Amino acid sequence: DDVHGLRRRASVWQSLITTAERRVVTPEVEADFSSSIIIAASAEPMKVPEALLAGFRRIELEPSRQHDIARMVVSTFEQSKLALPEPLAFQIASMGRCNPLRAQLFASELRDRHRASASAMPLNRESLLRLARSQWHVDEHGLADRDYLYLQALESGPKGLPALQHLLPMPDEEITVHIEPYLQHIGAMHRGPRGRSLTVLGEQLLHRHRSREH
């Protein structure tokens, strides 16, 4: 899992995939995988070195649905004999950008804080939003400051990736791997022949964000 974490030692692990011997020899381990089937998973495939990717048959999975993630969140609370209102489960799924691991982390923190002090952290929307802004630094849509900087950069009209890379104070990978896929998923931006552009929803989100700031 999280095979992109091997990027710094890709040359060591590449022998596992590309050589006939299928052996790995490192200072810590020597292993024979000649009769093994190796499955690697990553939520960030763009971080996996191309040389390592070349040894695999790639299978693209559909993104998790909000409904499925909400069910996982509810289960997290049920295991502690707590009942989480369904709207809150969907809200956590949204705040987690429809990423199961991220949503589960948010759910676990809300659950643990509620168990520690139910009066200070009741299971309601106000508590969830307060926790999201103070600890997770996201709003009810799962958007952080970096997302709004991106939307703001599109206000003056469609832009290609080079223009955005010049305008935004963040690594290219941040734009293409973390920001754009989710904004496109929720319909806040559109990719077309002229480049990236704001949608009506993107304009509305940006307007609400500015209203909150003032």
Image (tube, rainbow, N blue to C red):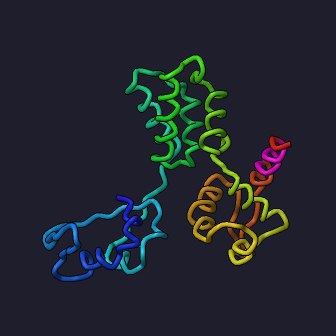
For the record, the magenta segment spans: 205-211
Figure label count: 0
Residue sitting farthest toward the front:
27
Q: Quadrant of residue 39?
A: bottom left
The image shows residue 214, relative to residue 83, as above or below, that is: below
Q: List x then y, in percent, for residue 121.
A: 58, 24
Relative vertical location of residue 13 with respect to residue 20 in this rendering, above or below: above
| Residue for point 73% across, 55% down | 148
**Residue at 25%, 79% in the rendered image:** 15
Q: For the N terminus, which image quadrant?
A: bottom left
> On screen, 157 above or below 113?
below
Q: Is residue 180 magenta?
A: no
Compared across the picture, whether 19 is left or right of 93 comes to left
The x and y percentages for residue 50 are 42, 79
Q: Residue at x 74, y 59 (%)?
A: 149
Rendering coords of residue 124 (x, y %): 61, 24
- Residue in front for this viewpoint, 184 or 24: 24
Question: Any magenta on residue 210?
Answer: yes
Q: Quadrant of residue 36?
A: bottom left
**Quarter holding the C terminus?**
top right
The residue shown at (59%, 30%) is: 87
Magenta-highlighted stretch: main secondary structure? Answer: helix
Please state the horizontal and vertical placement of residue 75, each as a whole percent of the image. 41, 31
